[in-house]
Every structure is written in C-alpha cells, then in structure tokens.
Image: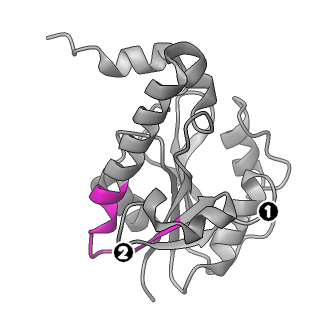
Amino acid sequence: MRRQLVIFAKAARLGAVKTRLARDIGALAAWRFYRATLFGLVRRLAGDPRWCTTLAVTPDAAARRPGLWPAGVRRVPQGAGDLGARMDRALRLAPPGPVVIVGSDIPAITCNHVARAFAELERYDTVFGPSDDGGYWLVGARRRPFIPGLFDDVRWSSARALADTRANLGARYTAVLIDELCDIDTGADYARRSRPAMK
C-alpha cells in the first residue's frame, strides 16, 4: 500500500478563485496569486517519491482540460456536495494506503509537512494541520479502520471547522495536530505574507 497525497484544487479561472482576496487586491492579482501557489505547490509535492500525488479538481469538467493544470499529475473530479462530502469521497476512493489531503492555496506547505503527516498516521488514526482561523489546511487518515461521518455537520469557513471535525471522532479514534499554517484569504493576509521579516 502506497501513501496517497490528494491536493484539492479549483480551476484557476479569473474571477472564480480567491474571491474574498480579490475584493481587497483585485481579481487579476488574486488569480495570479492562486495560480502561482497551485503550480508551485504541485511542483514541490508531486515529485516526491515517498507518496503518490493526485489532483482532485473542481469543477468536474475541468479535469479533462490539461491546460488548466500542472502537467504530469493524475487528475480526478471532486464530485458533488459540500467540502466535507468531497473530502469524504476522496478518502473512500483513493487507492489503498494512508491518505493526506491538502488545499492548494497555502503557499507555505512543504514536503516536510506532508512527510510528518504521514509519519503521524503510523501512530494516530487522523492528523490535522490547523490554520489560524479555526479551520485546517491538511487532514489525513490511515483508513484502517475507516472513520464514518468524519466531516458530518462541519461548519465550513468558520472558526469551528477544526473543532467540529475533531468532535466527529468521538472517543474511539485518535488525532494529532501538526504545524499551524496561515491561509491567504484577505488583503491583510496577503500584505503580511509579502512584508519582509523583521530582524
């Protein structure tokens, strides 16, 4: 059984990605940011031999349009439903082995983060990479046993998303957190990322 990395991605179309960010910095700048982040992430992660990488894409029809995506990576449609339904489907349909799912709009994700998540799945049933807004940029499951209802009734895009998901584990399943990373959703987030670090 191979480790399976699934990158959730939206087709990088002007006006259709990072819409909250676009309100602050403009649609073109938000599109450029998202596309650069997606392609850079795939370049970093997909070539690592420690796991197999799949792009789970939306809208579904875009999976058949190679020009929208980095070359050389297997693509599958995300399918219908909210984010929870789509991630549940990715966990169920991935080839055998532990699965880690990441988003495509977190610039700081590295191979070391993914490797650590897979290493934690040797000891825990699930792993989460928390974000500073109460959500998470990474979720992984070893799938032995499969956890039913992991994403049921999660309040997505809220400060409760991680807490809701962990509550679905109950007392039966174990979880561990890895590094907190920041999503870039607003102009303020974007400015902080672009600002040189103080020495």
Name which residue lies at 42% across and 59% down: 117
At x 55%, y 26%, the residue is 185
Which element carries disc 2, helix, strand or loop? loop
User: Gap in Å between the C-alphas at discs 1 and 2?
Assistant: 26 Å
Q: Mark 1 or mark 2: name the one nearer the start of the chain.
A: 2
SS assignment at label 1 = loop
Question: Residue at image x 65%, y 80%?
Answer: 93
Q: Nearer the viewer, residue 175 or 77?
A: 77
Q: Is 165 drawn above or below residue 97 in the view shown?
A: above
Q: Can residue 170 be seen in this view?
A: no
In the image, what residue occupies the spot 52% across and 46% down? 12
User: Mark 1, residues whose alpha carbon is within 10 Å: few (<14), some, or many (≥20)?
Assistant: few
Amino acid under disc 2: Trp
- In percent of width and height, residue 17 lies at 58, 38
The residue tagged 2 is 51
At label 1, the amino acid type is Ala
Q: Residue furthest top?
A: 198
Q: In this view, does 50 lie above or below 84?
A: below
**Residue that sits furthest to the right in the current view:** 153
The tag on residue 48 is none
Looking at the picture, how far across and down is residue 150, in whole percent? 75, 60
Left/right placement of residue 122 relative to residue 14 reads left
Q: Quadrant of the N terminus?
A: bottom left
Q: Nearer the viewer, mark 1 or mark 2?
A: 1
The residue where tag 1 is placed is: 80
**Does residue 34 appear in this view?**
yes
Please state the extent of the stretch shown in magenta in the rendering: 42-55
Contact between marks 1 and 2 (CB within 8 A): the answer is: no
Look at the image and say whether residue 45 sits in the magenta stretch.
yes
Q: Does the magenta stretch include residue 97?
A: no
Which quarter of the image is occupied by the C terminus?
A: top left
Image spot of residue 22 (x, y percent): 56, 23
